[in-house]
Image (cartoon, rainbow, N blue to C red):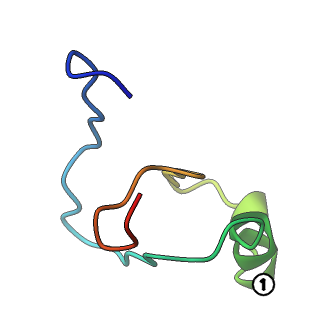
Amino acid sequence: MNKETKLQVEAIKNGTVIDHIPAKVGIKVLRLFDMHNTNQRVTIGLNLPSSALGH
């Protein structure tokens, strides 16, 4: 990601964040919580850089 790129996600007012999930597990989490069959807004970021994980 270059210095010009910014990731932007709307602030969560009422909801839950599941963070630092290992690669290739995100879609499994969506299915586990049945989030792939909802009318509610779901924001997903897969394989994003993370300073906490050294990426």
Q: From the viewer's side, name the closer residue of 4 and 39.
A: 4
Q: Position of residue 1 (x, y in %)?
A: 39, 28
Q: Is residue 4 above or below residue 45?
A: above
Q: Position of residue 2 (x, y in %)?
A: 31, 21
Image position of 20 (left or right of 26) = left
Q: Position of residue 12 (x, y in %)?
A: 23, 61
Residue shown at 38% from the left, 75% from the top:
17
Residue shown at 48% from the left, 50% from the top:
48
Q: Is residue 35 above or below residue 32?
A: above
Image position of 13 (left or right of 2) = left
Q: Position of residue 21 (x, y in %)?
A: 57, 77
Residue shown at 18% from the left, 64% from the top:
13
- Farthest residue, direction front: 54
Q: Name the amino acid type tagged 1.
A: Leu
Q: From the viewer's side, name the closer residue of 30 and 15.
A: 30
Pointer 1 local density, CA inside 10 Å: few below 14, some 14–19, many at least 20: few
Q: Which residue is mark 1?
A: 32
**Numbered disc 1: secondary structure:** helix
Occupied quadrant, residue 35: bottom right
Image position of 13 (left or right of 23) = left
Q: From the viewer's side, name the closer residue of 31 and 53.
A: 53
Q: Quadrant of the C terminus?
A: bottom left
Q: Is residue 30 above or below residue 50?
A: below
